């Protein structure tokens, strides 16, 4: 009797393992500071407004898009496209700050310090302006790898300004996706081994 009930137990172990790895994968892919992944688009929440985040490195990657982290040093172009039409008539300011305090992916607006601290950490800035096309573009040459924080500030006429941040890493290459691939491969190998083990138990029972 013990052998007969062994296979369901092993199947539950496999199911639990795969579910856990799936949760880890989704959390890594969907949670990264102020940017989330929705329908294959990187979306930045700016108060009640939303913007589509796209990055390019034309000198090294051509027209290939990236979301959040910038794989190489050098020239990078960050494009923020308004999803909500109301943003087309609201002045927007975009900054790139050096993460001098080591705040990481969980950086919050209130942790950046006062206006003087933000100004001191700023390496690139798009002055406040109305972008009637809904698209704001900021280009910067990153001389070295490191951690940075993007800051977007909107100044609507009603309700007061709203600010959002999106932390990111420069110069990490594609190592993050390589790690994900190893995790998935490991999960498949473990699942295959456990299923083989369960089948052997079933054959022994027969």
Image (cartoon, grey):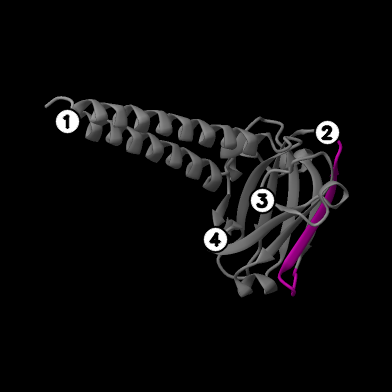
Quadrant (top left, top right, bottom left, bottom right) of the C terminus: top left
- Check disc 1 and report the residue beneath it: 4
Q: Residue at x 50, y 41 (%)?
A: 25
Magenta-drawn stretch contains 146: no
Kindly report the distance in space between the C-alpha atoms of the residues bearing marks 2 and 4: 32 Å
The disc label shown at residue 114, or none: none
Percent x, y of residue 188: 47, 35
What secondary structure is marked by label 2?
Answer: loop
- Check disc 4 and report the residue beneath it: 39
Select label 3 or label 2 by which is in front. 3
N-terminal of the pair, mark 4 or mark 3, is 4
In the displayed structure, 115 sits above or below 191; it is below
In the displayed structure, 17 sits above or below 48; it is above
Kindly report the distance in space between the C-alpha atoms of the residues bearing marks 3 and 1: 49 Å
The disc label shown at residue 67, or none: 3
The residue segment tinted magenta is 130-143
- Check disc 2 and report the residue beneath it: 144
Foreground of the two, 45 or 161 = 45
N-terminal of the pair, mark 3 or mark 1, is 1
Label 4 with label 1: CB-CB less than 8 Å: no
Kindly report the distance in space between the C-alpha atoms of the residues bearing marks 3 and 2: 19 Å
């Amino acid at each position: 009797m013990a052998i007969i009930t062994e296979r369901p137990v092993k199947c539950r172990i496999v199911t639990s393992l795969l579910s856990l790895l799936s949760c880890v994968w989704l959390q890594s892919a969907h949670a990264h500071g102020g940017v989330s992944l929705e329908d294959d688009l990187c979306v930045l929440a700016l108060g009640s407004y939303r913007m589509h985040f796209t990055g390019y490195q034309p000198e090294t990657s051509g027209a290939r898009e990236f979301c959040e982290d910038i794989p190489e040093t050098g020239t990078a172009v960050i494009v923020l496209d308004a999803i909500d039409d109301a943003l087309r008539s609201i002045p927007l300011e975009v900054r790139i700050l050096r993460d001098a305090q080591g705040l990481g992916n969980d950086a919050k607006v209130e942790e950046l310090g006062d206006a003087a601290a933000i100004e001191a950490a700023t390496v690139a800035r798009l002055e406040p302006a109305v972008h009637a096309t809904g698209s704001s573009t900021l280009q910067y040459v990153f001389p070295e790898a490191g951690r940075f924080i993007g800051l977007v500030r909107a100044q609507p006429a009603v309700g007061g300004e709203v600010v959002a941040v999106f932390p990111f890493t420069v110069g990490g290459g594609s190592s993050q996706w390589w790690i994900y691939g190893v995790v998935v491969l490991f999960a498949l190998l473990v699942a295959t081994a456990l299923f083989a083990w369960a089948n052997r138990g079933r054959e022994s029972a027969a």
